[in-house]
Amino acid sequence: MRYYFTDFFNWEQPKIDQLRKEGKYVYSVIDDEGEHYSIRRWGICNRFAFLVTDVDIIPADEELITDEEFIALNGKEDNCLATPFKDVSAECAALQRGYEKNRDEIRRRYE
C-alpha cells in the first residue's frame, strides 16, 4: 500500500474527485484529541488532513480505522499519489476565484 497525507482547500474538490476517478482513495483524517487520529471515508468535523491511498484500507463493514491500525498496515509514503494524472488545475483555479470573490464581497459588507 502506498499513501500520502495532505490537505486540500475547499476549491480543490475537482482534484479529489479526479483522484477517486483514477482509482485512488481519499479519506478524511479526524483528530481524536491528544496524539491520536482516525481515518474515515467521509468526515468534516475535526478534520485536519486528508489521506490518499492506492488501496481501500477501511473494511466494507467499518466506518473508520484508527491511527494504530493504519500504522500496522506498513504502507510506504508516496507524495505522487496526491497529484491526479488528468490536469484539473483550471477547474480548481476557477473555483478559487469564485471563493475569493465571495469572500471579498462578504468582507466589504461588514466593513
Image (tube, rainbow, N blue to C red):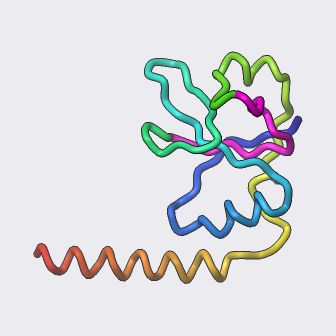
* Residue farthest toward the left in the current orientation of the protein: 111
All told, the count of numbered labels is 0
Q: Is residue 58 magenta?
A: yes
Q: Is residue 22 left or right of residue 92?
A: right
| Residue found at x 44% / y 81% | 98
What residue lies at 56% left-to-right and 25% top-to-bottom?
A: 37
Q: Is residue 16 above or below residue 87?
A: above
Q: Position of residue 3 (x, y in %)?
A: 79, 40
The segment highlighted magenta reads 48-61
Q: Is residue 79 above or below residue 90?
A: above
Q: Is residue 68 left or right of residue 83?
A: left
Instruction: Tell me, yes or no, whether the highlighted magenta stretch contains residue 65.
Output: no
Picture coordinates of residue 30 (x, y %)?
53, 34
- Say which residue appears at 85% left-offset and 61% top-offset: 22
Tell whether 105 sits left or right of 82: left
Task: Give the image quarter of residue 46.
Answer: top left
Viewport quadrant of the N terminus: top right
View extreme (right): residue:
1
- Give the image location of residue 28, x and y in percent: 59, 42
